[in-house]
Amino acid sequence: MTPADGLMPAADGLPASVHGSPLPDNGPAAAAPAGRADARAARKPNLAVVGATGAVGGVLLGILSERADIWGEVRLIASPRSAGRKLTVRGAETEVLALAEEVFDDIDIALFDVPDEVSARWAPVAAAKGVVVVDNSAAFRTDPDVPLVVPEVNARAARARPRGIIANPNCTTLSMIVALGALHAEYGLSELIVSSYQAVSGAGKAGVDVLRSQLSAVSGTELGTTPGDVRRAVGDDLGPFPAPMALNVVPWAGSLQEDGWSSEELKVRNESRKILGLPDLRVAATCVRVPVITTHSLTVHARFEREVTVAGAHEILAAAPGVVLCDAPEEGEYPTPADVVGTDPTWVGRVRRSLDDPLALELFVCGDNLRKGAALNAAQIAELVAAELTGH
Ligand SMILES: NC(=O)c1ccc[n+]([C@@H]2O[C@H](COP(=O)([O-])OP(=O)(O)OC[C@H]3O[C@@H](n4cnc5c(N)ncnc54)[C@H](OP(=O)(O)O)[C@@H]3O)[C@@H](O)[C@H]2O)c1
């Protein structure tokens, strides 16, 4: 199967358990008053989308329109700048409301797709009103009282949410973790060395706008042949990036942290450890931005406790929910962002056993950073919670 076949646009290949059938009870859920819980079980849950006008929010509205419609009301929320705008979800034009405490009245689950500081302030406000928050920002991901959930890997963790908040992982981690979770279950992961090739939409709408305008500036020219010629052509407005993105790759994503690491690189390390339940996992990541609109790619060197084989890894990946194996280099078949964009699964190719280490595999992984990397994973978590709340 190749992504170029155009297979599975928006089909995620996930098992029923990830689409909302009940999970075994394995921990305390956020407390809800008994009366309210009974009332909730009797009707379809109401959903709020906070950040509906953004890059992730826009994709989420499409996903909500495509997937099984389990929701009562879907309420759209953004900043006061967007209040009154109309967006389409589930085929209906819906007015955007400005974020305020009262917009969470009668809401059961809220998906937050807003900047970190907005989530940090408003997610607890919603949670205090009994709303289960699924947050896409980095504000709560490392909080020990907030589970970090990927339904194919650790769905049960979503049930233990003392703060009423569930965190959605960072798009770079999410673009590889479903495949790695499947391999870990068989071989026991001990070390990860990854390099990312991250799309500009990972930096939001502003990232996409700046790449498109830079591509117009360099299109049809002979630029890219002398130092600084691209920089001069694209001008000073680099948007959210530290260097031109057109005709370039930039070894930087996120903010500067201690000892030269970027925040994105530390997220890959911390979040992989938390999702897989491996607090001592050795992780080294180098995050690189590339001139791709949407779909992150990663090269992965994964070392395991047990000896690996390519045939064994193929078998695991071919059977793993949410993963598509696309690995026939002799026929030119491997995933690329241009083919994977707009699809739901994690695509894996170039599977090799390390030449110098029988415990290690080399992989190339692609995943749409706005779908599984953000909106789809959050929608899947919301569906898990909805099933739990309604007892279905
Ligand atoms: N892009 C990705 O690949 C990706 C992947 C995973 C996670 N995330 C995370 O998801 C979140 C959203 O990212 P994005 O890429 O969609 O960003 P974006 O395109 O910049 O959109 C931001 C959204 O937040 C809203 N917003 C901003 N300030 C607000 C405020 N004070 N009150 C209420 N709403 C406010 C915006 O509303 P207005 O339109 O009204 O300004 C907009 O809907 C971020 O935390 C990001 O780190 C992004």
Image (tube, rainbow, N blue to C red):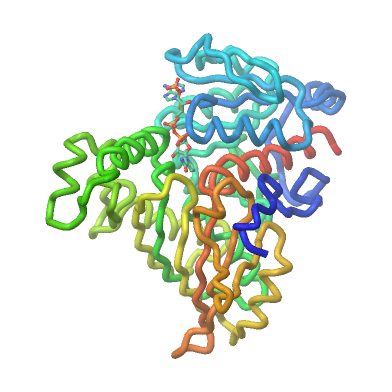
Percent of width and height locating residue 57: 54, 31
Residue at horizontal 55%, vertical 19%?
A: 77
Quadrant where the N terminus is found in the figure: bottom right
Q: Farthest residue to the top: give it.
A: 84
Image side of residue 382 versus residue 54, left or right: right
Residue drawn at the location 33% of the way across and 50% of the way down? 253
Residue at (58%, 40%) from the top-left corner? 375
Query: How many numbered circles are shown?
Result: 0
State the residue in front, 180 or 161: 180
Depth check: 189 or 55 in front?
Answer: 55
Picture quarter containing residue 42? top right
Residue 36 point in image, percent of width and height: 78, 22
Answer with left or right where residue 384 lies relative to residue 360: right
Name the residue rendered at 86%, 38% in the picture. Answer: 392
Can you name the residue that lies furthest to the front here? 220
The answer to whether residue 34 of the structure is visible from this angle is no
Ligand 1 image-quadrant field = top left
Which of 234 and 120 lies nearest the eye of the viewer?
234
Horizontal side, residue 288 vs residue 154: left or right = left
Q: Is residue 299 above or below residue 48?
A: below
- Between residue 320 and residue 166, name the one nearer to us: 320
Residue 351: percent from left, percent from top: 55, 76
Q: Is residue 359 above or below residue 286?
A: below
Is residue 181 in sight in this rendering? yes
Rendered location of residue 237, percent (x, y): 22, 34
